[in-house]
Image: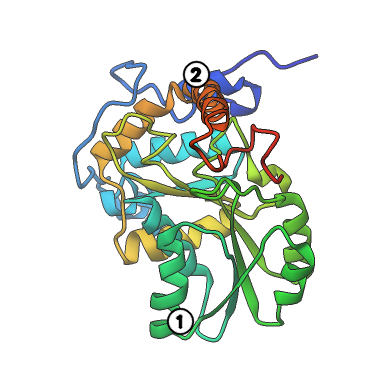
Amino acid sequence: MTDRPDRTRPATLSDASLAVHAGIHVDSTKALRTPLVMANSYLLPEDPSDISWSATAPGLYTRNTGVNQQALQEKLAALEGGEDAVALASGVAALHAVFFTHVRVGDHVVVSDVTYEATWRLWTELLPQRYGIEATFVDITDHDAVRAAMRPNTRLVCVEAMANPTTQVTDVAAIADIVHDAGAILMVDSTYTPPPFYRPLRDGADLVVHSLTKFINGHGDAMGGAVIGRHELIEPIKADAMVDVGGIISPFNAWQIQRGSVTLPLRMRQHLASAQAIAELLADDPRVAYVYYPGLPSHPQ
């Protein structure tokens, strides 16, 4: 018998219902939307033994995780089908959080040679020059090249599900097999392909990164980033990048993005319809040399 929809159990909800209900906890006010909580500290119990002093425990200090940050993280984990999530100040902060937490001096990283500019700068300038981490850029569509690029000290492989801005598509399942055979971690930037459009964790990705500023918020009025994945990979990011480095998302931005995400499934359907219409129009225009769009027969993939 199929489980009846239950807002407290994300696995029973449709994509549209997940976007509305995930991460919402009705409090004493009985409000159906998480209220904006700007407090930076929380009331502690009189008995110190009742306090969870874990670095990432919610309800302690906003840098550890506030009400709105926690609600957003729960929603993002549910939307992506992940165990846990961490929300940060921007998409680039989320990328750096993964690198800062899961890569060490002397490690090697494989990166798609078609990647977001900020990611490119991180791996060509900041991380090699300051931290001694070497990166190899490869054509991620050439699986033999990816396999050949792996080394004994390869710790992380970074790809985009759909590259910004060329729309090159990554076969995440195939890359995941190569990465895991080498004992490394696969991080997929899925900013261009948010849920329910695509969920990389289902194809073997270990970590999924989003610039929440873009599709997930969708209203052009808030900045944020997130990393979603297994708890044992997310918890160190919370402790290192969120608490110790302080790259947190503000309560207001978290509240704005959670609000924006409610309409994500509806907006994505319209985005796809509009993009297809525009791509077809441009493809038929003799003044346009080439249109990069996966929905066109001319796309190489």
Q: Judging from the image, what secondary structure is the residue with disc 1 in? A: helix
The amino acid sitting under disc 2 is Leu
User: In the depicted view, which residue is nearer to us: 244 or 281?
Assistant: 281
Look at the image and tell me in which quarter the N terminus lies: top right
**Label located before the other in sequence (1 or 2):** 1
Q: Is residue 179 visible?
A: yes
Q: Is residue 130 above or below residue 234?
A: below
Q: Place residue 213 in its image quadrant.
A: top left
* Secondary structure found at label 2: helix
Residue drawn at (66%, 82%), measured in percent from left and top?
153
Which residue position holds label 2? 266
Which quadrant of the figure has residue 34?
top left
Q: How is the image coloured?
A: rainbow
Drawn side of residue 180 relative to residue 153, left or right: right
Q: Is residue 34 above or below residue 56?
A: above
Give the quadrant of residue 167. Answer: top right
Question: What residue does disc 1 label?
Answer: 128
Q: Which mark is residue 257?
A: none
Q: Position of residue 88 (x, y in %)?
A: 36, 51
In the picture provided, is 193 more to the left or to the right than 27?
Answer: right
